[in-house]
Amino acid sequence: MRTVYVNGSYLPETEATVSIFDRGFLMSDGVYEVTSVLDGKLIDFDGHAVRLQRSLDELQMKHPSSKDDLLEVHRELIRRNEITDGMIYLQVTRGNPGDRDFAFPPEETAPTVVLFTQSKPGMADSPMAQTGMKIISIEDQRWGRRDIKTVQLLYPSMGKMMAKAAGADDAWMVEDGHVTEGTSNNAYIVKGNTIVTRHLGHEILHGITRAAVLRFAREAQMKVEERSFTIAEAQEADEAFITSASTFVMPVVEIDGEAVGEGTPGPVAKRLREIYIDESRKAAV
Ligand code: PMP
């Protein structure tokens, strides 16, 4: 049985509880982060901690604890659950005001903090990296502040189910004719030596993996264009891929039934995946 963390205590997962009045439960009034673990160490912890702070600030939510304290909780959960490869999920909500009310609760209301581990042995050797993913496109029907990592995940969850029903692995969301991002990842295409991915803004989550991968791509003398693109442009690209903390870099080989490039994982996606995993292991804490 897993040991999880809730509001300062380490407990067996069956004994960890949160109030029915919690703002996260009633209003999706919460933010989260997912940090990967490889070889028992955290990948890009700093990036996730900085983004958490930003999400909290944007929603005028209290910071539950310092970055160092959070790091210690992550490490303690890795130790207690003997995680080699996997993820640490962290969620902070606006807490439990003791009743339901649209107005934000009083200042002194303590945030709710929950962390738990997900063990994924051999996560860096996912078979999907060899075959590539098939994706479909769907309309982006999420709210307008996707740069804040909130727990409002109903539409992305529906998107995954639409993909599944269509025999695909995931969906890319489209707004005003242009791809925003994947249901839980950032989206990229490759044409020649150029990598194209949507520019940052309120329309997409500012992926921690995205920032690292673009840095590595530039260091490897690839050209990076941060701009939006259409599904038609993606279908005609040489390659496509996604990035996220839990999938790293994952090739996309089919979009709405059309093969991308040769219909197999391309060299750029493969290389970036290798570089990202190697460099992340080296810098892990
Ligand atoms: N976009 C969305 C909508 C996501 O949910 C995620 C993963 N949480 C990402 C992008 C990728 O972000 P990261 O690389 O920080 O995991």
Image: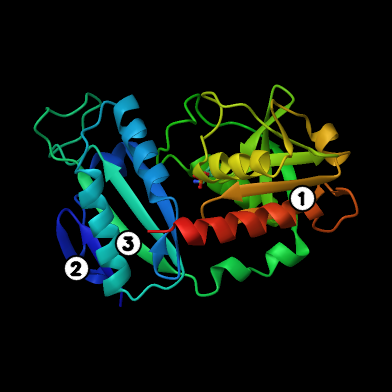
Left or right: 26, with 195 as reference point: left
Looking at the rendered structure, the kind of residue marked 3 is Phe
User: Dot 3 surroundings within 10 Å: few (below 14), some, or many (20 or more)?
Assistant: many
Residue designated by label 3: 116
Question: Under tag 2, what secondary structure?
Answer: strand
Of residue 217 and residue 238, the one placed in the foreground of this image is 217
Residue tagged by mark 1?
268
The mark closer to the camera, 1 or 3, is 1
Q: Label 2: few (<14), some or many (≥20) within 10 Å? A: some
Residue 157 position in % (x across, y down): 54, 48
Residue at the location (16% across, 29% down)? 105
Q: Which colouring convention does the figure follow?
A: rainbow
Asked if residue 230 lies left or right of residue 102, the reply is right
Residue 232, horizontal then vertical, whole percent = 85, 33
N-terminal of the pair, mark 1 or mark 3, is 3
Q: Position of residue 229 (x, y in %)?
A: 75, 29
Amino acid on which the number 2 mark rests in the picture? Leu
Residue at left 29%, top 72%?
Answer: 79
Residue 276 in percent (x, y) is at 59, 54
First-in-chain label (2 vs 3): 2
Find residue 86 and report its image quarter: bottom left
Q: Which residue is mark 2?
A: 11
Amino acid found under the numbered disc labelled 1: Val
